[in-house]
Image (cartoon, rainbow, N blue to C red):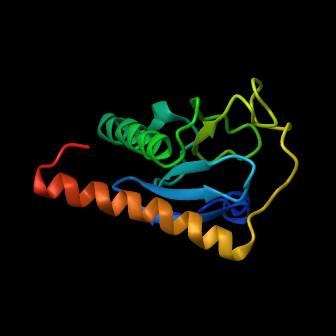
């Protein structure tokens, strides 16, 4: 059985933040919106229903964790979650922090945001910030402290 291979478009448009239990957590290279993506490390998956029941449960928990992290880090007005796959068939879930004053509001971000990649230094800072939040949460869970 071949190993997990990330679709080349996802690889080109995002940066790996960390591996979670099921998914790669990736940062979309679009500074106009705090935008994370979950890519389950399963071969030949296009749709959420194709995952087995255990993986679907893990994916839903990861979506909730990523949503919570974006809420803590950015205090958005809304969190958008979407698994479209119209352009890239590999199963991936977008989790996007939205603000009433962002350039696309109230519409979806697709096709409404001008390309705005992070500068390298800013990209590293955002990645570190997400990882710090994740590590803090993990430490709190180990010690029994509620978030």
Residue 94 seen:
yes
Residue 1 seen:
no
Residue at the far top: name it.
106
Q: Relative to the observer, which residue lies in front, 80 or 145?
A: 145
**Quadrant that contains the C terminus:** top left
Residue 68: give x, y in percent of width and height: 42, 40
For residue 99, what is the image quadrant?
top right
Residue 3 appears left or right of 92: left
Q: Which residue is drawn at 82% across and 57% down?
A: 116
Residue 34: give x, y in percent of width and height: 63, 48
For residue 133, what is the image quadrant?
bottom left
Q: Relative to the observer, which residue lies in front, 111 or 113?
A: 113
Residue 83 appears left or right of 60: right
Residue 118: give x, y in percent of width and height: 74, 65
Q: Residue at x 75, y 71 (%)?
A: 119
**Quadrant that contains the N terminus:** bottom left
Residue 88: give x, y in percent of width and height: 71, 47
In this rendering, the count of numbered labels is 0
Q: Relative to the observer, which residue lies in front, 46 or 70?
A: 70
Q: Which residue is drawn at 40% across and 64% down?
A: 132
Residue at the far bottom: name it.
121
Q: Residue at x 49, y 57 (%)?
A: 25
Residue 138 appears left or right of 83: left
């Amino acid at each position: 059985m071949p190993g997990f291979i990330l679709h080349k478009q996802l690889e080109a448009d995002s940066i790996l933040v960390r591996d979670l239990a099921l998914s790669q957590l990736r940062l979309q290279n679009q500074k106009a919106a705090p935008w994370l993506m979950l890519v389950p490390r399963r071969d030949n998956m296009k749709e959420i229903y194709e995952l087995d029941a255990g993986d679907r449960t893990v994916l839903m928990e990861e979506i909730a964790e990523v949503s919570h992290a974006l809420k803590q880090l950015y205090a958005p007005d809304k969190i958008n979650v979407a698994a479209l796959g119209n352009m890239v068939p590999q199963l991936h879930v977008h989790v996007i922090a939205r603000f009433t004053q962002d350039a696309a509001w109230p519409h979806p971000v697709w096709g409404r945001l001008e390309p705005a990649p992070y500068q390298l230094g800013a990209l590293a800072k955002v990645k570190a910030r997400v990882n710090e939040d994740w590590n803090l949460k993990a430490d709190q869970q180990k010690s029994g402290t509620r978030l």
